[in-house]
Image: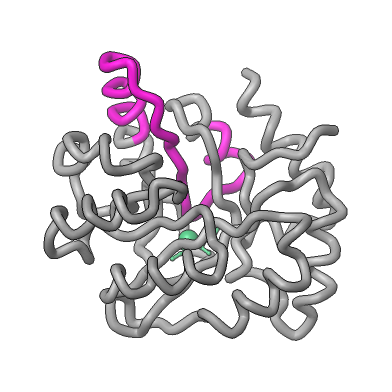
Amino acid sequence: MEKTSLIRPSLLAADFLHLKREMDQIVRLPLGTVHFDVMDGCFVEEVSFGEPLYRTLRAAYGRKVDFDVHLMVKDYLRHVELFSGLGAKTITIHYEAVRNFRDVARLRKRHPELSLGLALSPETDVSRVLSLYDIFDRFLVMSVVPGRGGQAFLPASLEKIRRLDLFRRDNGLSYEIEVDGGVNLQTGRECFRAGADALVCGSAFFRAEDKAEFLRELLSGKEE
Ligand code: DX5
Ligand code: ZN
């Protein structure tokens, strides 16, 4: 099986006590991307992990997988500079954290090599972000309240995915639609059907006994 980046395991749901074992298992699977949640205790209440762990994992596994860095932080400009300086090529910031999109447009110009994403929390309407398509390579639909893994998928997210997909098709655009939160075999299939390109999957992935089989099944939803 060829490597896929359509499914991105979220490390937040990994067994931290055995993180090496979890990462070794991931890189043996045909997976090209791992999702890396950064929380600052300010944009969201929780604190997850950041620079030290990123450095460690990138040094150990950076030749085998890419890291999809999801910044749930208030100080997004500083964090984008920090992580891109550490070699991250795929970084997503939150719409709700942005104070001035002119700053983001400047950031975009400074880093043409970056795949830059914009995440929408559940309360954010899609109509607010559509006009920003020329700054971003990706829209990330948060299908749970950002901050914690293991929450139930919010069904209203499907309509957001459909609208992003429709706007993309109507305007001949090519941004990626990524979905994060509560993704399992059933909700994952619905997301793909609604027009999603890539799914972040935390609890359901790490809970699966047979991860290769779980991955195959989740991906089969893309082909339907
Ligand atoms: C939530 C994080 C997600 C989370 C997904 O704030 O951004 O990446 O780890 O976990 P599950 O799949 O368990 O909802
Ligand atoms: Zn995330």
- In the displayed structure image, the side of residue 214 where residue 33 appears, left or right: left
Q: What stretch is highlighted in magenta?
A: 161-189
Colouring rule applied to residues: one colour
**184 in the magenta segment:** yes
Q: Residue at x 57, y 32 (%)?
A: 189
Q: How many numbered circles does the render carry?
A: 0
Q: Where is residue 192 in the image (x, y as percent from the top left)?
A: 52, 30
Residue 87 in picture, x, y percent from top left: 56, 64
**Quarter location, residue 77:** bottom left
In the picture, measured across the screen, residue 7 lies left or right of residue 152, that is: right
Does the segment drawn in magenta span residue 25? Answer: no
* Image position of 88 with respect to 198: above or below: below
Quadrant the N terminus occupies: top right
Q: Quadrant of residue 204?
A: bottom right
From the image, which quarter does the C terminus lie in? top right
Residue sticking out furthest to the front: 110
Name the foreground residue: 162 vs 135.
135
Q: Please indicate, yes or no, whether residue 154 appears anywhere in the rendered image.
A: no
Q: At which x and y percent is residue 140? A: 39, 47
In the rendered view, would you say 153 is above or below 96? above
Residue positioned 62% across, 50% down in the render: 8
- Apparent side of residue 34 relative to residue 18 in the rendered image (left or right): left
From this viewpoint, is residue 129 visible? yes
Residue at 27% of width from left, 14% of height from top? 170
Q: Which of 172 and 163 is in front in this view?
A: 172
